[in-house]
């Protein structure tokens, strides 16, 4: 039952109805004035809004002068992310930290440079005195993204040079946030599960020699234990989520807010607000919940006809949340394949075997194969449909025993690297404040005195 503070009163409902009634814009006007809704054209391609050297997404290639869909590719500073991960796996080392170095500084680090960078991150991986007690433990939210944003904004008060937007100071602030995001996220969750769920409270300190992925598992689990494969798979997930071009919603938010000249904490908090949205960072939660429903409804997980029937009912708004979507399928940019999903899929099977969850893995694999066929039969689509990164990431997090509340914060722990690189890029180029135009379509009217209204 909602408390009085949260109540929607009849007066508020009436005013909300008025807002909606007078706020609707005829969709035909977007076509008439050639306005790209969502800053996308009719083919779903993003409207060009800026230039970047940080990352590149490839979904098409030129053939006879025409753009033809191709297997998706993702490049960090010009380097294929699949090659980056292969190198880390081949040399048996964690790669998120060197990926962060690459995104921030534009080059892969030498061993000495990476060691120095890791020492700096370790140095910054400690919160101000009493921050956990005074900030994180007080009024814990049920949503860890709000807790994380509040913590980030509060860190502004602990910084003597909070408003200094010189590049050295912004880099220092960004590196501190990169180092602290795992602590802020996990400690926020521990406070919530203690005060709201009555669970035991434990706050583990991070360990200097451990990687970001290892430290997340170390501070999250009561016994601090994890397997080498668990840490490796989480590290790869962090690499794949670290950056995805300047046009995704939260990174574009970082550019927009940074262009105003505001402080780092405000810019990153704004990006967190964007990432929290279920259309952006919360998508893998929808995938997990969809599969939980599927596993209850579908009696035989090996029966292709029964699984296909469920998928069709999803599209017909007859199953799960009745939204008409198969979550984890398709992407705003990629067409034939999402390279991040392909990389994740290659590690999902090994983790499934270690965790004894091969039946679920086989179900995921079947859906990944059947869903594109069914979507193409049921819907008119302008490009290919394939599993995206959210399709497998939620399953991976489930096998890592990560609580659902931390799925989106894990995304943020990775993406803060990309946000930081884009903030520095925006400030370095010192462009104009980003201010797109909106066309007014409201007819002009005369002012009416109070006694002539109604």
Image (cartoon, rainbow, N blue to C red):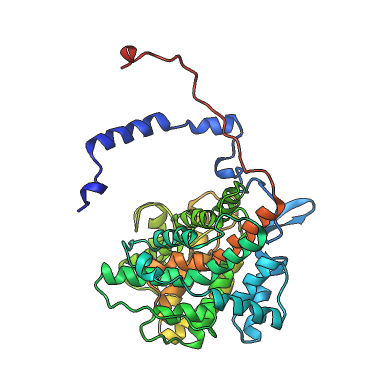
Of residues 367 and 212, the one nearer the viewer is 212
Residue at left offset 42%, top offset 87%: 225
Horizontal side of 195 relative to 220 (left or right) equals left
Of residues 319 and 188, the one nearer the viewer is 188
Residue at left offset 26%, top offset 48%: 6
How many numbered marks appear? 0
Horizontal side of 32 relative to 58 (left or right) equals left
315 versus 41 height, above or below: below
Of residues 98 and 160, the one nearer the viewer is 160
The location of residue 277, given as percent across then percent down, is 45, 54
The location of residue 154, given as percent across then percent down, is 44, 60
261 versus 450 height, above or below: below
Residue at left offset 70%, top offset 82%: 112
117 versus 104 height, above or below: below
Residue occupying the far right of the picture: 64
Can residue 338 be seen in this snapshot?
Answer: no
Of residues 367 and 18, the one nearer the viewer is 18
Can residue 238 be seen in this snapshot?
Answer: yes
Horizontal side of 291 relative to 88 (left or right) equals left
Q: Quadrant of the C terminus?
A: top left
Residue occupying the far front of the picture: 160
The location of residue 61, given as percent across then percent down, is 73, 58
């Amino acid at each position: 039952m909602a408390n009085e503070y949260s109540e929607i009163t009849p007066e508020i409902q009436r005013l909300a109805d008025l807002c909606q009634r007078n706020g609707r814009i005829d969709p035909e006007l977007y076509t008439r004035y050639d306005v790209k809704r969502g800053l996308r054209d009719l083919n779903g391609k993003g409207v060009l809004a800026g230039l970047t050297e940080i990352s590149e997404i490839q979904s098409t290639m030129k053939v006879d002068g025409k753009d033809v869909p191709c297997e998706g590719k993702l490049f960090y500073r010009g380097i294929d992310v699949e090659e980056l991960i292969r190198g880390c796996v081949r040399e048996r080392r964690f790669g998120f930290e060197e990926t962060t170095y690459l995104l921030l500084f534009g080059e892969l680090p030498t061993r000495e440079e990476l060691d120095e960078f890791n020492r700096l991150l370790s140095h910054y991986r400690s919160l101000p005195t009493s921050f956990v007690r005074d900030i994180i433990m007080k009024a814990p939210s049920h949503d860890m993204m709000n807790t994380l944003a509040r913590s980030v904004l509060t860190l502004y008060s602990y910084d003597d040079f909070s408003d200094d937007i010189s590049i050295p100071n912004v880099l220092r602030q960004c590196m501190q946030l990169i180092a602290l995001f795992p602590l802020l996220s996990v400690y926020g969750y521990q406070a919530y599960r203690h005060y709201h769920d009555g669970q035991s409270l434990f706050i583990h300190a991070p360990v200097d020699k451990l990687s970001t992925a290892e430290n997340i598992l170390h501070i999250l689990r009561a016994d601090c234990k994890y397997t080498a494969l668990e840490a490796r798979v989480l590290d790869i997930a962090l690499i794949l989520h670290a950056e995805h071009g300047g046009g995704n919603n939260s990174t574009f938010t970082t550019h927009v807010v940074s262009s105003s000249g505001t402080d780092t904490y405000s810019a990153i908090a704004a990006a967190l607000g964007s990432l929290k949205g279920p259309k952006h960072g919360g998508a893998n939660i929808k995938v997990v919940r969809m599969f939980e429903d599927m596993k209850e409804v579908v009696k035989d997980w090996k029966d292709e006809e029964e699984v296909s029937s469920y998928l069709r009912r999803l599209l017909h708004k007859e199953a799960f949340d009745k939204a008409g979507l198969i979550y984890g399928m398709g992407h705003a940019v990629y067409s034939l394949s999402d390279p991040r999903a392909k990389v994740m899929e290659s590690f999902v099977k090994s983790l499934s075997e270690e965790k004894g969850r091969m039946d679920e893995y086989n179900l995921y694999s079947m859906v990944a194969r059947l869903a594109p066929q069914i979507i193409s039969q049921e819907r008119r689509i302008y490009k290919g449909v394939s599993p995206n990164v959210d399709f497998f990431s939620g399953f991976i997090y489930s096998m890592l025993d990560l609580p659902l509340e931390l799925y989106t914060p894990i995304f943020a722990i990775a993406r803060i690297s990309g946000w930081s690189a884009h903030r520095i890029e925006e400030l370095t180029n010192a462009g104009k404040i980003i201010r797109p135009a909106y066309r007014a379509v409201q007819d002009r009217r005369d002012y009416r005195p109070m006694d002539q209204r109604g």
